[in-house]
Image: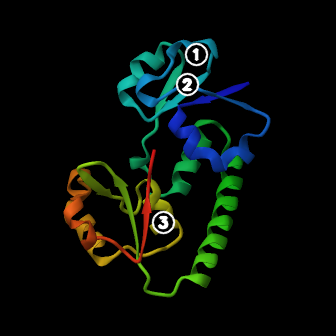
Amino acid sequence: MYQFSTTKVIGYGEFLKDYYQGQDIVDLGNEDAVSLETATSLKPDLIITFAEKNVEQYEKIAQTIVFSTANYDSVEAEITAIGEMLNHQEDAKKFIADYTARAKVAEEKIKAVIPEGITFSLFTLSEKEIAVIPSGNSGGEAMYDLLKLTAPTSIQKLIEDSNGDWQKQRISWETVGDYVGDYVGVLEN
């Protein structure tokens, strides 16, 4: 049995290797240039994708589900939904229990070495601008929601004022100093 994914998701899922031991994960390439020939040759029963624009192509290969994290308010809800889609509800419950326990250990380790009141900023960078990563999104979900770290007030205000508009969560290099916390994380693909 083969599992397959895009290069980006495989890279993000590095910490999941223990969960797919003994199974081959075939890399289909970058999200914008997925190898449909490779996907077809693997004869999948189901394709789960984030890319709505590719559904028509994928449906020619196998039953396709578009999975949007925006439909769920937590990682636990996302895992539960995937477990239901795959009829692996018990595996999902076990994963969530393990995930929650590991997160609690990490949170306690951080609290043991980081004084209260310390702030954390999370950004992605480009030549012209910087995107502020909020809670509930990409690494912000891990940093702010899971590990319960605090963003600087300036970032909290920017996120609130943006009303979820990703474009309004971008800042210029000239103003980045206004959004830097005591610690800075950078997400890089």
Q: Amino acid at mark 1?
A: Thr
Residue 89, percent from left and from top? 66, 46
Q: Amino acid at mark 3?
A: Met
- At a point 52% along the width and 26% down the height, the residue shown is 29
Cα distance in 3D space between marks 2 and 1: 7 Å
Q: Secondary structure at mark 3?
A: helix
Label 3 sits on residue: 143
- For the residue pair 64 and 166, the one nearer the viewer reads as 166
Residue 163 appears in the rendering = no
Q: Residues within 10 Å of mark 1 (few under 14, many from 20)?
A: some
Does residue 8 lie above or below 45 as drawn? below
As drawn, the label of residue 38 is: 1
Label 2 sits on residue: 28
Q: Amino acid at mark 2?
A: Leu
- For the residue pair 5 and 174, the one nearer the viewer reads as 174
Does residue 2 lie above or below 152 as drawn? above
Give the quadrant of the N terminus.
Answer: top right
Q: Secondary structure at mark 1?
A: helix
Cα distance in 3D space between marks 1 and 3: 35 Å
Is residue 174 rendered to the left or right of residue 45? left
Give the quadrant of the C terminus.
Answer: top left
Is residue 142 rendered to the left or right of residue 97? left
Q: Residues within 10 Å of mark 3 (few under 14, many from 20)?
A: many
Q: Are marks 3 and 2 in contact (CB under 8 Å)?
A: no
Residue 130, percent from left and from top? 29, 56
Task: Give the mark, 1 or 3, whose residue is nearer the N terminus.
Answer: 1
Residue 79, percent from left and from top? 57, 49
- At a point 40% along the width and 23% down the height, the residue shown is 54
Q: Residues within 10 Å of mark 2 (few under 14, many from 20)?
A: some
